[in-house]
């Protein structure tokens, strides 16, 4: 990562220009340029997924679009670079300088462009996959294209430096490109995004390209007048883009915290609730509303229903235990901790930054009784001592269309079954189509292959009002008592049970698959939800 900020590559390239043909320094300079440019291209590819997540979410479809667009840009760039790789040393260096400058400019341009074009692309009525591909292409194909042009030209120059052993030169350049791609991927995923954020990462990549452009411009031995004019054009373009970005607030991240997993925001929700409250948003998806004054006040109907399941099973018992697959705002753990002083609660949250935000901005306080284990929910549950079981396991890791597939499968259901006490229950909220909930039906079929009692609860108003609806699925050794599904204040809940016979018929007619670790096509089953189709 630090090498992208280093100015050493520029002088080294220029110094190499004065060396005789066959110089090892020149070959090393060309290999370094391929390595650094490849790293920049892969950093931008990883950052691209994070940049578009607040607009279209994070799913198989978004990553597929990002990878395909970046590879398309590289491929077109390689072809163009091959056509340009016919000049001598000085002319090639001038071309490389301009290509790197264009790569830098188009990389910076991603920042204002995403603010300018996303409302039009996403609001134009395209199919969601088409919209994702169009948005990704508009933002990232040009930076990838200009980076892709570099390696054929640099490889041709490297071969000219070692004409008696072209295979060795080819091997060096291909290896440098691969190492750079690996380094860029690791740097972006493990360091840059969580340290300097996506905007900082974009600017760092563009800065690296600018420095390399300067190095090749120097190596081309330009006249002072041409060098000054070229530098002025590039700097003016960069300043114009940065000014536009600043005016559009594109240099300010939409995230309050940008972690290795999510773009995390916390917003004041008091105008909607009429009480001091806050809502947590992960990427573009709401995940929990917490009430400041009363931890037991549940603003979300599905949490009221889950809370009712607990009372149906255990009444006013204080010594129950619960495991939460996903924490987020920790709304329900916070309520149960306040209402049941004897409860033992364990929360598996994959992102420590999410927990920290819940503590800092959403009034959540872990304790000896309410513990948070940072890790994947399935792995945390699996690795507990064999004799540890729970009275309730709550699945709260399905974020709208962003569903971790390994938390939907038969193998995971078997793990839940093993970890439930005899009277225990599993409950998970699912957002799916109001008329054709294919994922919900597949999940239900999968749970039915393990549990003798699986129920689906529907909120009638949601089913009637929109394309999407929230469902709650429960699994246990025995069902729940319908007449006791009330709020803590005794109010009857609006949820109704999907009649078992009708549910079985819907599963059979839908033809949905049994979800397994080997085959869980969750994204395909939820594609119509992404498209907002009923």
Image (tube, rainbow, N blue to C red):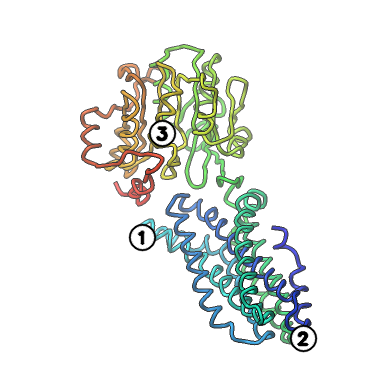
Query: Label 1 near label 3: C-beta < 8 Å?
Result: no
Identify which residue, 74 or 493, lies in the foreground.
74
Residue 366 found in image quarter: top right
Furthest-front residue in this view? 164
Instruction: Give percent across and percent down for residue 212.
Output: 69, 71
User: Tag on residue 126?
Assistant: 1
Q: Nearer the viewer, mark 3 or mark 1?
A: 3
> Residue at 54% across / 53% down in the picture?
50
Q: Nearer the viewer, mark 3 or mark 2?
A: 3
Tell me if 398 is positioned left or right of 444 in this view.
right
Instruction: Give percent across and percent down for residue 335.
Output: 51, 23
Q: Nearer the viewer, mark 2 or mark 1?
A: 2
Measured in 3D between alpha carbons, the distance from the residue under mark 3 to the one under mark 1, in whole angstroms, is 37 Å
Instruction: Give percent across and percent down for residue 341.
Output: 55, 15
Counting residues from the N terminus, which is met first, the one under dot 2 or under dot 1? 1
Q: Secondary structure at mark 2?
A: helix
Q: Label 3 belongs to which residue?
A: 411
Tell me if 296 is positioned left or right of 252 in this view.
left
Q: Secondary structure at mark 3?
A: helix
Instruction: Give percent across and percent down for residue 122.
Output: 42, 58
Measured in 3D between alpha carbons, the distance from the residue under mark 3 to the one under mark 2, in whole angstroms, is 69 Å
> Residue at 33% across / 19% down in the picture?
478
Residue 31 found in image quarter: bottom right
Q: Is residue 36 above or below residue 384?
A: below
Give the class, few, some or many, for how many residues have Cα within 10 Å of label 1's Cα (few <14, many ≥20).
Answer: few
Q: Label 2 belongs to which residue?
A: 224
Give the class, few, some or many, for how many residues have Cα within 10 Å of label 3's Cα (few <14, many ≥20).
Answer: some
How many discs mark residues in the rendered view? 3
Counting residues from the N terminus, which is met first, the one under dot 3 or under dot 2? 2
> Residue at 48% across / 20% down in the picture?
389
Identify which residue, 189 or 31, lies in the foreground.
31
């Amino acid at each position: 990562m630090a090498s992208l900020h280093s100015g050493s590559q520029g002088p080294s390239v220029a110094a190499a220009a004065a060396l005789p043909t066959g110089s090892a320094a020149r070959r090393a300079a060309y290999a370094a340029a391929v390595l650094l440019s490849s790293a920049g291209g892969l950093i931008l590819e990883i950052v691209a997924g994070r940049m578009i997540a607040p607009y279209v979410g994070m799913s198989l479809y978004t990553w597929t679009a990002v990878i395909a667009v970046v590879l398309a840009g590289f491929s077109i760039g390689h072809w163009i670079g091959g056509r340009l790789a016919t000049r001598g040393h000085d002319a090639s260096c001038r071309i490389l300088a301009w290509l790197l400058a264009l790569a830098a400019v188009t990389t910076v341009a991603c920042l204002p462009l995403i603010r300018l074009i996303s409302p039009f692309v996403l609001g134009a009525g395209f199919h969601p996959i088409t919209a994702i591909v169009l948005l990704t292409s508009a933002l990232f194909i040009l930076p990838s294209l200009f980076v892709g042009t570099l390696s054929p030209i640099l490889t041709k120059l490297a071969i000219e430096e070692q004409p008696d052993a072209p295979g060795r030169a080819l091997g060096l350049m291909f290896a440098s490109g691969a190492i750079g791609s690996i380094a860029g991927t690791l740097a972006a995923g493990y360091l840059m995004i969580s340290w300097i954020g996506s905007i900082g990462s974009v600017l760092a990549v563009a800065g690296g390209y600018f420095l390399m452009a300067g190095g090749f411009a120097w190596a081309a031995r330009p006249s002072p007048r041409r060098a000054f004019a070229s530098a002025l054009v590039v700097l003016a373009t960069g300043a114009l883009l940065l000014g536009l970005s600043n005016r559009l607030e594109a240099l300010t991240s939409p995230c309050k915290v940008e972690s290795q997993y999510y773009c995390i925001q916390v917003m004041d929700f008091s105008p909607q609730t009429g009480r001091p409250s806050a809502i947590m948003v992960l990427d573009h998806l709401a995940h929990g509303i917490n009430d400041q004054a009363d931890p037991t006040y549940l603003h979300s109907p599905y949490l009221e229903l889950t809370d009712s399941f607990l009372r149906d099973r255990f009444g006013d018992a204080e010594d129950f235990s619960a495991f939460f697959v996903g924490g987020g705002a920790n709304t329900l753990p916070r309520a149960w901790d306040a209402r049941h002083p004897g409860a033992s609660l364990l929360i598996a949250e994959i992102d420590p930054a999410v927990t920290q935000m819940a503590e800092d901005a959403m009034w959540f306080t872990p304790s000896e009784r309410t513990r948070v284990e940072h890790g994947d929910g399935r792995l945390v549950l699996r690795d507990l001592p064999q004799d540890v079981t729970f009275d309730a396991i709550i699945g709260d890791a399905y974020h709208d269309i962003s569903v971790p597939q390994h938390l939907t499968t038969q193998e995971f259901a078997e793990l839940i079954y093993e970890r439930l006490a005899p009277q225990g229950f599993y409950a998970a909220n699912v957002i799916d189509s109001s008329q054709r909930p294919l994922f919900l039906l597949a999940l239900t079929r999968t749970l039915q292959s393990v549990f003798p009692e699986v129920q689906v609860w529907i909120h009638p108003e949601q089913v009637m009002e929109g394309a999407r609806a929230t469902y709650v699925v429960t699994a246990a050794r025995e069902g729940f008592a319908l007449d006791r599904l009330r709020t803590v204040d005794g109010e009857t809940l609006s949820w109704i049970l999907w009649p078992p016979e009708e549910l079985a018929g819907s599963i059979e007619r839908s033809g949905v698959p049994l979800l397994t670790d080997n085959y869980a096509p969750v994204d395909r089953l939820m594609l119509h939800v992404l498209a907002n189709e009923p």
